Amino acid sequence: MNSLELFTVNNLWMLVATILVFIMHLGFSALETGLTRTKNTVNILFKNVSIISIGILTYALCGFNLMYPGDFSFGQFFGFAGWGLNVPVGNAGLIEYANGQYTYYTDFIFQAMFAATAATIVSGAVAERIKLNSFLLFSFLYVAFVYPIAGSWKWGGGFLHQMGFYDFAGSTLVHSVGGWAALICAYLLGPRIGKYTKVGLKPIMGHNMPLAAIGVFLLWFGWYGFNGGSVLSADPGAVSYVFVTTSLSAAAGIVGSLLTSIFYLKTNDLSMILNGTLAGLVGITAGADVISPMNAIYIGFISGILVVFSIIFFDKIKIDDPVGAISVHLVCGIWGTLAVGIFSTSYSFVIQLIGILSYGFFSSLSAFLIFYTIKVLIGVRVTEEEEIIGLDIAEHEMESYSGFQIFTVE
Amino acid sequence: MNSLELFTVNNLWMLVATILVFIMHLGFSALETGLTRTKNTVNILFKNVSIISIGILTYALCGFNLMYPGDFSFGQFFGFAGWGLNVPVGNAGLIEYANGQYTYYTDFIFQAMFAATAATIVSGAVAERIKLNSFLLFSFLYVAFVYPIAGSWKWGGGFLHQMGFYDFAGSTLVHSVGGWAALICAYLLGPRIGKYTKVGLKPIMGHNMPLAAIGVFLLWFGWYGFNGGSVLSADPGAVSYVFVTTSLSAAAGIVGSLLTSIFYLKTNDLSMILNGTLAGLVGITAGADVISPMNAIYIGFISGILVVFSIIFFDKIKIDDPVGAISVHLVCGIWGTLAVGIFSTSYSFVIQLIGILSYGFFSSLSAFLIFYTIKVLIGVRVTEEEEIIGLDIAEHEMESYSGFQIFTVE
Amino acid sequence: MNSLELFTVNNLWMLVATILVFIMHLGFSALETGLTRTKNTVNILFKNVSIISIGILTYALCGFNLMYPGDFSFGQFFGFAGWGLNVPVGNAGLIEYANGQYTYYTDFIFQAMFAATAATIVSGAVAERIKLNSFLLFSFLYVAFVYPIAGSWKWGGGFLHQMGFYDFAGSTLVHSVGGWAALICAYLLGPRIGKYTKVGLKPIMGHNMPLAAIGVFLLWFGWYGFNGGSVLSADPGAVSYVFVTTSLSAAAGIVGSLLTSIFYLKTNDLSMILNGTLAGLVGITAGADVISPMNAIYIGFISGILVVFSIIFFDKIKIDDPVGAISVHLVCGIWGTLAVGIFSTSYSFVIQLIGILSYGFFSSLSAFLIFYTIKVLIGVRVTEEEEIIGLDIAEHEMESYSGFQIFTVE
Amino acid sequence: MKLIIAIVQPEELPEIKEELLKRKIFKFTVSNALGQGKEIPLQEVYRGIAHEITLLKKVRLEIAVNDDYVDAAVEAICKVANKYQEKGRGKIFILPIEECIRIRTNEKGKEAIG
Amino acid sequence: MKLIIAIVQPEELPEIKEELLKRKIFKFTVSNALGQGKEIPLQEVYRGIAHEITLLKKVRLEIAVNDDYVDAAVEAICKVANKYQEKGRGKIFILPIEECIRIRTNEKGKEAIG
Amino acid sequence: MKLIIAIVQPEELPEIKEELLKRKIFKFTVSNALGQGKEIPLQEVYRGIAHEITLLKKVRLEIAVNDDYVDAAVEAICKVANKYQEKGRGKIFILPIEECIRIRTNEKGKEAIG
Ligand SMILES: Nc1ncnc2c1ncn2[C@@H]1O[C@H](COP(=O)(O)OP(=O)(O)O)[C@@H](O)[C@H]1O
Ligand SMILES: Nc1ncnc2c1ncn2[C@@H]1O[C@H](COP(=O)(O)OP(=O)(O)O)[C@@H](O)[C@H]1O
Ligand SMILES: Nc1ncnc2c1ncn2[C@@H]1O[C@H](COP(=O)(O)OP(=O)(O)O)[C@@H](O)[C@H]1O
């Protein structure tokens, strides 16, 4: 077991990482708000503030004990250590809890910050047309049950862990779990009015590019905690290595999307390189500790290319994702997880694929069942009139930019 | 005394906490700007940038030595260790200074960041109508003298400390000290033109909800340093515990204000859940290290409810507080301090109450004397014409959003 | 060599400092965007996102090995340790790499974050009229070659280091190296249309003051990592000392610029105190570890005054710098470096001057050669029509604030 | 020559544009406006205080046409707006124009308008 | 039928609205504008450079009324603005309307205007 | 009295202002507008989707003048805009004003306009 000193510094890093993951929620809020219209701004902010609350509270209620059940009840698929926090007393919750890496409380709060992320990913994809209550209900159920159960399969020591599936910080466990739900919900919701018209595709422009850029920078900032914290200690070699691969992949993601934008789209599309940055980050997340710096650059670069084509693809099949959440989190999440099997000799491509499929199956099925049930019971989409007037007025009776003159057409 | 290693980690955490508290000033700036009108934006930013400067410099000048005087001159009420920084030489300022928790310099800068907070709280409550010079003068005097003297009573080892009063990170010492001044100043200033009309209450809407949300997220972010740093070491158990209670209370504050908004106000008011988040944070601040996680949820939840009713109440008695500073910092600061007496068996409700009253008496009296004197001598309120045209033009001859079309009426 | 514990905490601090320096790029983006016009917002964000990518990738490609060549090939002026990262294996890259201060990877990524800064400084000065491609090309060359070669002279152990030149965290090595390039490029580009008219100077107002303030606060925030990380360990005494001098100088910079604005400009100019804050930060950067707290206040105060007069001066000689980058980074960078020679008895004023001149000569010559070549070959300035319509439409075919009504004239 | 000023709901603009083009009316000017009419006011709530917004967002169209195009223009606008049978569909005002000048060519009168 | 175009100070709008309602004029359209007139220009300073803003913020009211309401409307506006005796109180222009159409019902003329 | 409504390119405004002042026309009102005309539409691309912006940014000038100033005003505007020989230079419409009132003084007619 580590010395008290090492325990303290390890734990400190995990706490700092927690804060960094926390601020990613501001990143998501800003990005989603920036890439949608003024008339839905209050709504998006409201959802994002609520989600972080739902995430933390449900994780305390049951999520933590579903994700790290200790013993499984159904094979290695499901286990539950009971409601609420079971704080081990004395040193068992402190230095002994994880051999001097972090305390019980640190473990809980670090993981809790991750949990809310999955729901936030969905938030962007369904923006500008989902009913507030239905969204909050969906998030509640998804974060409280689906995310932690899925998580237990690998991080909780479940069957995928046993098989040797590898996902360092959650390209699959967090990003694609959120991404699948985003895909299913966006599909069930249908596109925003005016996006896919008889005369073809029409862009619905985001209203605040500085806000979107703030979002991406803060997400990158927080990602150092997301990936760096996933080392689960302050081990100098490991954490600094993860910092380097993470940075290189993000930087390469920018280059990848930049070149694709210039050569394929023939323009310098800011929203694309913003997504490309995130693509690079999601792509490296599964293997940040095992991928070489050079390969990190490849992975990020490919992620950056992939995300642009993916965004175009989803528009082609008329799945309307205002912020590119599906392309960033699902597509690059899958790619990043596969990349571990490709670039690292220690992990098997096939097992990575099995992991991806297992998560895909479970996440999308759960998302479908939950969202479809909500759709049938209380509906998921606002009325056409509400959508046109905007959710800020329709759901919140409030404007986001009072005093500013805003032109709502074209 | 701690080992060099432990000293280094402890000190590192205190420095990181310092940075986190620093960024709360951006949080306040963004929140206050977002919840007021475009025409006073430059003014609010100007005030907030100035305050952080005033806070740090006066704390170096006299604040630190008033707050931690070592020996008291008047009973346990007032002491002063002299002007400027008295840096202990050699190890006395380093590992020996606080038994290997932090250095003299760390102590100073961490505390200095706290100091400015008290004045910032006032800034929000008096926004949109106060004269710039009068405000800066008030802040200077309040931060340089009132805050540190008040602080010495508990954190400096004064009479309330001797009595067993408990305030972990400053629900009372920081938030209510700022809150009382906010109340007094808002009262002496009077409401903004157009808020309380013959035909009744009229809302004066904030102009930038994303900015307000950025503010709240950053404040929460910084609060991990505010509360976590108040452990005064990187003790893994204590800091992680504080992180958990702080997070749970904030999350519960959101739920509390959300439900109150839905069921009592019959709407999903974003500005209310933003205030609810902060309410939860202020509420837990007094007892973050001694309140159980479950009780942290209760405290936060009640804070969230309280803040909504409090905002409505202050509007009813026509004390105009554009950002809800009094409700968040004063009302929830009092509640949080009392809650320590209620939920923790180690502390007495009565003594908590005595502490609250002592601070209330001293802070509001000082605020009144200072602000009233300024009012008489140079005036505190801009002219009606200046208020209508906005402080940006009136006091700064500058616009905040040049190029944007802004509608100044209705 | 340090113990494993001390190594871990030292390394942790360097990584946290890395993250803080990273977020300065958001600070720069926000500040530059806020102080320019809506019609060039997408362009500025695009440049800033690209620069961080260029910075990190070129530093991996060659920058790191140019800046820290180990052995020099040409006297102490130029050395190159080869392309790509040469990761030392085993403990040589870990605890042994820097005697238990940080790992090889930490060293690389911390330095890489610095590299991009130099180019970002230029970005502000040339905003609103430079061709995107030319800018990216210039940044690439300047960051890949000029910055690291210049850096090697001091931090890489080159001739200025041998002479006893002192620049703690880069008033000269980073800020003035960027500042010289900013000056040269702004000069070669010429002023924005409409700034210097026949009838005199006309202000071109920034469009978003809250954004500018966010930028400054984040820069200050990140500066704790910039200066604090330059201690190159978590040494409690040194890091906390640096925090204190940095904070005091920034605070005094605000006061200096505030008083100059009030008494000389006869107004409370927010943009000036924002620049004053940064001036104080740049000013202290060269000597943050050797300047006394009192002198830090003087240095910051003078920086704050200097920056205001400098901004007015550059307008007088018709060098158009939209965000004040030259005044902040070059002028105060020089002042801060000289101040080390003035206020600290351990360093010689003359040698400080020699250092400043060496960097000035090399940076401005290189910037001139590169930028002039680009000017001749592909041009550096957009057409008049593009400048009038704005770079967002001209270079990116995109608007930054879709839906908002924006008045493009007066 | 007449100046047709039409105050319509913002969301109708794209359709109105199409209808006008169909009728060979290619030129017009749009600005945004706030209108008070018979429409039901919007309810807003901010920090617990409810208030009614009676000035609602409108789009203001200005179309200068020769006399023989007036009916077509009016009809185009009405066609779109008439789909909805709620209050607040807006108004059209027709004003006389005495002279019209195409700045670029200095053409005047009927020639200049289109 | 007349179109009354009034350029007034922004802060007067709420009061003008009230006065109009009192006189049974319930419908009008508002847009924002910048006006240059006799008013003292605003002084602005940015980064040490002073400049004068001569185009000041105004509100532009359009009120279409039947002829017998013209005086009432003008009076309502003047009443509010006259309180202040400074320059820059604004102007009212009265233009003839040839036709007015209520889009919703296709009503025309006098019936349609109110 | 006439109301001159001119739709011009935003960047021309400062120069037009100067030219008007030279001709002793000191008062006018400006608002922003979007215009569709013969001008080449702007191409925008967002997230891989191109689209054309046909409604382009314009500035809308309203100048009320006595009859003898009409030509001067028109000439001032055309002078500036004519420099450029591209499409989309804009239009001027001249409408009759029946009455003009200076709110501050209640002056009417010719006296009030300037
Ligand atoms: N007399 C008028 N003068 C100016 N604008 C008017 C007038 N009547 C209607 N409007 C404009 O038209 C809009 C719709 O008018 P309203 O009377 O509500 O429509 P409807 O006749 O369909 O009920 C109003 O919001 C206002 O902007
Ligand atoms: N002849 C005009 N044409 C167009 N707008 C005018 C005219 N005269 C005045 N205005 C508008 O009215 C506003 C106030 O006019 P001004 O002459 O300053 O008022 P006052 O007559 O009270 O001094 C101006 O800012 C402008 O918008
Ligand atoms: N008939 C019209 N009615 C209303 N506005 C018009 C009319 N014709 C032109 N405009 C306005 O003038 C602007 C320029 O017109 P355009 O026909 O493109 O200019 P040009 O005649 O120089 O080609 C248009 O964008 C529109 O705002």
Image (cartoon, coloured by chain):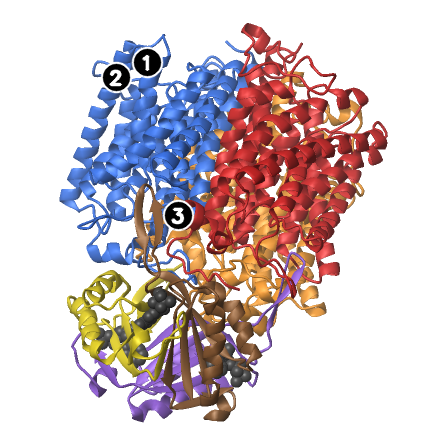
Chain colours: A red, B blue, C orange, D brown, E yellow, F purple
Q: CA distance from mark 3 to mark 2?
A: 40 Å
Residue C98 relative to residue F89: left or right: right
Residue shown at 69% from the left, 45% from the top: A327
Q: Chain of mark 1?
A: B
Disc 1: which residue: B341
Neighbor class of circle 3 (other Cα within 10 Å; few <14, some 14-19, many 20+) is many
Amino acid beneath label 2: Leu
For marks 3 and 1, give the one nearer the viewer. 3
**Dot 3 corresponds to which residue?**
A397
Q: Nearer the viewer, residue C238 or F106?
A: F106
- Are circles 1 and 2 on residues that touch, CB within 8 Å? yes
Image quadrant where residue D40 sits? bottom left
Q: Does the Cβ of the disc 1 residue fall within 8 Å of ligand 1?
A: no
Say which chain tag 3 marks: A
Residue A273 x, y percent position in the rendering? 66, 51
Q: Is residue C292 above or below residue C283?
A: above
Residue C278 coordinates in the image, percent (x, y): 47, 46
Of all chains, the one bearing label 2 is B
Nearer mark to the viewer, of 3 and 2: 3
The residue singled out by tag 2 in the image is B353
